[in-house]
Structures are given as C-alpha cells and as structure tokens.
Image: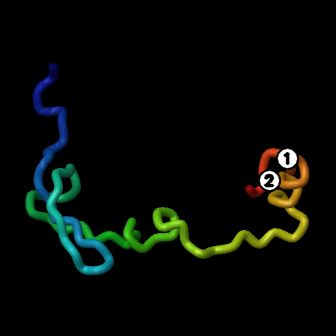
C-alpha cells in the first residue's frame, strides 16, 4: 500500500443544535476542531417524521395516488 496518501483521521467535537456535544473521529479540520451542525437528527423532520403536509393540487402526487389507488389504500 502507498504511504502518506490517506487523510489524517483524528478526534473532533460535534456540537448539535441543542448545545449538546460528543466526540467522534473524522477527517474534518484539525485535531480538536469543533463541528457545529445546522441540521440535528433529534429535531429535523427528516428523522422525526415531522408534521409537514404535501400540497398538491392535481399534480404528481394526485396522479400517483389515482394510478396506484389499490396499492396505497390506508388500512
């Protein structure tokens, strides 16, 4: 294997949006750097399910639901 081609893998501190911190290993920054997250898995709708609604007035979602009505029936 070639020498000196791999990035430096070191410990950093990750700060979540609620202020909590944890340490992990990464190639980000230098040893001891802090990475502040803008998107937090504890509060972001992509991870929590969210309460957003799809607004669609006769568009793609409506056509999909009409085409596959038997498959998408709610139980």
Q: Quadrant of residue 41?
A: bottom left
* Quadrant assignment for the C terminus: bottom right
- Please give the name of the residue rendered at 32% of the width and 70% of the height, measured from the top-left corner: 37
Return the residue at label 2. Answer: 73
Side of 10 relative to 39 (left or right): left
* Quadrant assignment for the N terminus: top left
In x, y percent, where is residue 53?
69, 73
Nearest the eye: 73 or 21: 73
Total labels drawn: 2
Circle 1/circle 2 CB separation < 8 Å: yes
In the rendering, which numbered label is found on residue 32? Answer: none
In x, y percent, where is residue 71?
80, 45
What distance separates the C-alpha of mark 1 from that of mark 2? 6 Å
Q: Quadrant of residue 54?
A: bottom right
In x, y percent, where is residue 68?
85, 47
Disc 2 element: loop
Q: Is residue 68 above or below residue 16?
A: above
Return the residue at label 1. Answer: 70
Side of 10 relative to 41 (left or right): left
Is the image coloured rainbow, by chain, by secondary structure, or in one colour? rainbow
In x, y percent, where is residue 30?
13, 58
Q: Is residue 35 above or below residue 71?
A: below
Disc 1 element: loop
- Please give the name of the residue rendered at 21% of the width and 50% of the height, measured from the top-left corner: 27
């Amino acid at each position: 294997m070639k020498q000196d081609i791999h990035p430096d893998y070191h410990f950093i501190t990750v700060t979540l949006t609620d202020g909590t911190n944890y340490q992990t290993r990464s190639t980000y920054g230098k040893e001891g750097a802090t990475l502040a997250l803008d998107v937090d898995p504890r509060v972001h709708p992509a991870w929590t399910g969210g309460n957003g609604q799809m607004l669609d007035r006769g568009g793609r979602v409506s056509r999909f639901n009409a085409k596959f009505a038997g498959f998408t029936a709610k139980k």
